[in-house]
């Protein structure tokens, strides 16, 4: 771990604000616009977009189920069961703009119908305090123990090892937190939509989302800390 | 981990960071957080690492992909759609 001081203050703050703006205006909404258009055309009876709609949502439902339960066979079955239910009740979709939460609500219920417990971590509550880093003061400066996140690529390409770490961290989350972060941060549903899909209050969604993010951050921080130590050691050994 | 050495402000910011990133806080609360971050390097480093965590999640694509949809499974879905589609009274021709 590296100790962080004021040296990055201005650049970090600037990138934080810029990053926040980019996050909230991310291009992922484009995908949502396309799927709304596909749903609208299907509602008009246009079968030309049928296959695109199926492939798009099949991949999404598979990802959600696979990360929720860790069983490939279940994920395939839930995707098919969900899509069948989607088309059987397609006339109940009144607003194409709501197609994503509508499909995921059906997917969540299809998961429950499987009645299989996740092979991952069982439900438990996460507390805020367990994720708060230690802070100390030395020579008049406040410091926390944190890995060097500046080396993390800020683009869309995740390195394979990092991806594995993220998947492991998601798997280690209790199920009631995992479902929230999958819908909110990966499927980018709103707080209100996530609450509706999972039959939770919006406050509960916000609480679980924050703690789930903190838990993932802690795992990634451990990994980045270990990786940077390894880089230093390897660098010294190779010299 | 014990929340050692943190001011009350740091602890409040820590609890609200996700709401801040999601722009789900009132303007005055956002301003308060930004004022605190501007003067607290440890909190800003922590906030930045949390923001990057969210970005990693939103850019994640699964290692496992579903197998190709079989003809029989596709036909089952198409039949279900066409059955409901009749209810739309669509004048569009079959494709």
Image (cartoon, helix red, strand yellow):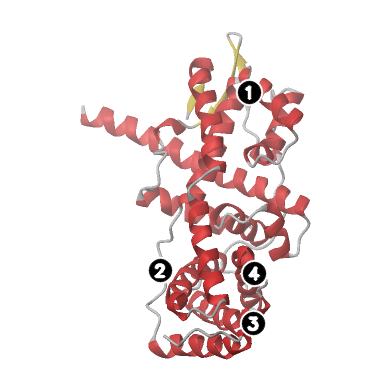
Q: Secondary structure at mark 1?
A: helix
Residue at the (61%, 9%) spot, across then down? A140
Residue receiving disc 2: B65
Q: Judge from the rendering whether residue A221 lies leftward or rightward of residue A212; answer left or right.
A: left
Q: Position of residue A10 (x, y in %)?
A: 52, 18
Q: In 3D space, how far apart are the residues under numbered discs 1 and 3 (Cα atoms)?
A: 49 Å
- For the view shown, which residue lies furthest in the top direction? A139
Residue at 64% x, 82% y: name it.
A89
Marks 1 and 3 close (CB-CB < 8 Å):
no
Residue under circle 1?
B37
Give the image location of residue B61, x and y in percent: 43, 57
Residue linked to disc 3: A89
Distance of label 2 from label 4 (alpha carbons): 22 Å
Q: Earlier in the sequence, mark 3 or mark 4?
A: 3
Tell me the CA gap for discs 3 and 4: 11 Å
Disc nearest the viewer among 1 and 4: 4
């Amino acid at each position: 771990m590296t100790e962080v001081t004021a040296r990055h203050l201005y650049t970090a703050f600037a990138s934080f604000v810029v990053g926040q703006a980019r996050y909230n205006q991310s291009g992922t909404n484009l995908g949502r616009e396309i799927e709304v258009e596909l749903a609208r055309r299907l509602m008009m009876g246009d079968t030309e977009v049928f296959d695109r709609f199926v492939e798009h949502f099949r991949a999404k439902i598979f990802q959600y189920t696979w990360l929720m339960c860790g069983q490939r066979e279940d994920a395939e079955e839930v995707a098919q069961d969900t899509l069948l239910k989607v088309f059987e009740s397609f006339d109940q979709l009144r607003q194409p703009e709501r197609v994503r939460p509508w499909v995921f609500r059906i997917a969540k219920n299809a998961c429950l119908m499987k009645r299989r417990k996740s092979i991952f971590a069982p439900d438990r509550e996460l507390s805020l305090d367990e994720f708060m880093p230690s802070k100390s003061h030395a020579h008049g400066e406040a410091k926390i123990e944190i890995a060097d996140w500046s080396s993390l690529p800020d683009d869309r390409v995740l390195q394979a090892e990092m991806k594995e770490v993220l998947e492991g961290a998601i798997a280690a989350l209790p199920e009631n937190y995992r479902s929230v972060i999958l819908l909110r941060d990966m499927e980018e549903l709103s707080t209100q939509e996530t609450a509706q899909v999972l039959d939770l209050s919006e406050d509960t969604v916000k609480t679980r989302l924050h703690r789930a993010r903190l838990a993932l951050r802690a795992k990634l921080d451990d990994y980045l800390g270990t990786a940077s130590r390894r880089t230093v050691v390897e660098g010294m050994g190779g010299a | 981990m014990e929340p050692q050495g943190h001011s009350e402000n740091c602890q409040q910011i820590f609890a609200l960071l996700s709401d801040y990133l999601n722009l789900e806080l009132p303007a005055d609360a956002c301003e308060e957080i930004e004022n605190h971050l501007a003067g607290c390097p440890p909190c800003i480093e922590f906030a930045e690492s949390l923001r990057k965590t969210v970005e990693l999640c939103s850019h994640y694509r699964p290692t496992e992909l579903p197998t190709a949809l079989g003809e029989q499974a596709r036909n089952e879905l198409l039949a279900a759609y066409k059955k409901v589609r009749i209810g739309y009274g669509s004048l569009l021709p079959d494709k």
